[in-house]
């Protein structure tokens, strides 16, 4: 076998090329149940501490979805919500991906994910 070097890389002439590899799909359901995923019988669980009563009172504004098509008048809806400490990151992503802005975050105690109305 002779060694060949070229613009697209180097290799051995006559060497067997590796078979095409396929990407391994790793997935799991949001509740940690692996009924549709490829992780076998492993379970992905939340990192929340059981009995944790810490929560945040979050005030945020979201653009009104009813007027999103016209773009003439974009109304902002202000809401305040109590969010458990364990799901704060997911809720923060939901607000920001929806085009919203987080205005105020306070430590609070109360019922998890209870909507407190407009403030």
Image (cartoon, rainbow, N blue to C red):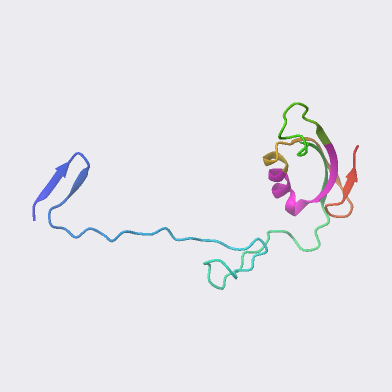
Question: Would you place residue 90 above or below residue 34 in this image?
Answer: above
The foreground one among 83 and 47 is: 83
Residue 72, position as x, y percentages in the image: 75, 26
Q: Give the farthest residue toward the bottom.
A: 41
Circle count:
0
Q: Give the farthest residue toward the left.
A: 2
Residue at the location (74% across, 54% down)? Answer: 86
Residue 64 lies in quadrant? top right
Question: Would you place residue 65 above or below residue 32 in this image?
Answer: above
Residue at the location (60% across, 69% down)? Answer: 34
Residue 61, position as x, y percentages in the image: 79, 36
Residue 53, position as x, y percentages in the image: 83, 56
Residue at the location (73% across, 42% down)? Answer: 95
Residue 28 lies in quadrant? bottom right
Identify the image quadrant of the C terminus: top right
- Does the stretch in magenta take in 93? yes
Q: Is residue 117 left or right of residue 46?
A: right
Q: Is residue 111 left or right of residue 89?
A: right
Where are the magenta residues, as a range?
A: 78-94
The foreground one among 47 and 22 is: 22
């Amino acid at each position: 076998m002779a060694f060949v070097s070229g613009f697209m890389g180097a290799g051995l002439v006559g060497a067997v090329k590796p078979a095409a590899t396929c990407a391994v799909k790793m997935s799991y359901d949001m509740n940690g149940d692996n009924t549709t995923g490829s992780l076998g019988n492993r379970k992905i669980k939340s990192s929340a501490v059981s009995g944790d009563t810490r929560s945040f009172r979050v005030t945020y504004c979201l653009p009104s979805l009813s007027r999103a098509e016209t773009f003439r008048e974009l109304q902002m809806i202000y809401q305040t919500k109590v969010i458990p400490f364990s799901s704060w990151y997911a809720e923060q992503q939901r607000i920001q991906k929806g085009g919203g802005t987080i205005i105020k975050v306070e430590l609070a105690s109360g019922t998890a994910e209870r909507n407190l109305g407009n403030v």
